[in-house]
Amino acid sequence: MIIKRAPFALVAASALLLLAGCSGGSGTAESSDDSMADGGTTTTQETTSPATPSAPAGDQTKAEACDIVREQFQAVSGAGSTVNSSDPQATLTAFKQLASDVGTQFSSITNEEIAPSAQKASGALNDYAAYLETVVADPSKASGLSDQISTLQASFTEAATACAG
């Protein structure tokens, strides 16, 4: 039984730790530019609640979209501290909920420059959650870890790059 738990904890933690590097600064440059453009007095207020933008769907700014991306990346990278090797089912449930929450937030991104990469990252996270479910059911399936993490990391890096550019 310990054999089943250890690989799952390592699998879940591996992805979350690798993604931690993608979460830093993915929207910082864009947000800073907006703050400087209007003196910084209202930009912070406007961009801290991107899930409920006041502008019509097609008018979402890149900074607003990137704020959503950055917040969700921080949530994903912070989830690494909740990996519990003694309860892989609870960890799996939490990871699936995280993937669902990220998907919900990323689906609110309407900026056409950021939305495609955000949706790709969300899809990769959902695929990874499904992979984890497979590993919980059969730990011998953990052999695909490297490919799964590479795909997930590449999609998160793509979204972070879209926000940085």
Image: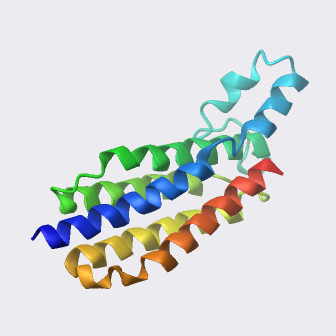
Coloration of the structure image: rainbow
Residue 100 in view, yes or no = no
The residue shown at (33%, 71%) is 132
Residue 13 vs 135, above or below: the answer is above
Q: Residue furthest left?
A: 1
Residue 86 placed where, x, y %? 15, 56
Q: Nearer the viewer, residue 86 or 104?
A: 86
Q: Quadrant of residue 114?
A: bottom right
Question: Can you see residue 132?
Answer: yes
Q: Which residue sits furthest right?
A: 37
Task: Give the image location of residue 96, x and y in percent.
Answer: 35, 61
Q: Residue at x 26, y 56 (%)?
A: 91
* Residue 25 picture location, percent across and down: 69, 41
Residue found at x 58% / y 55%: 106
Return the x and y of residue 61 as percentages of the image width and height: 78, 43
Residue 29 relative to residue 122: left or right: right
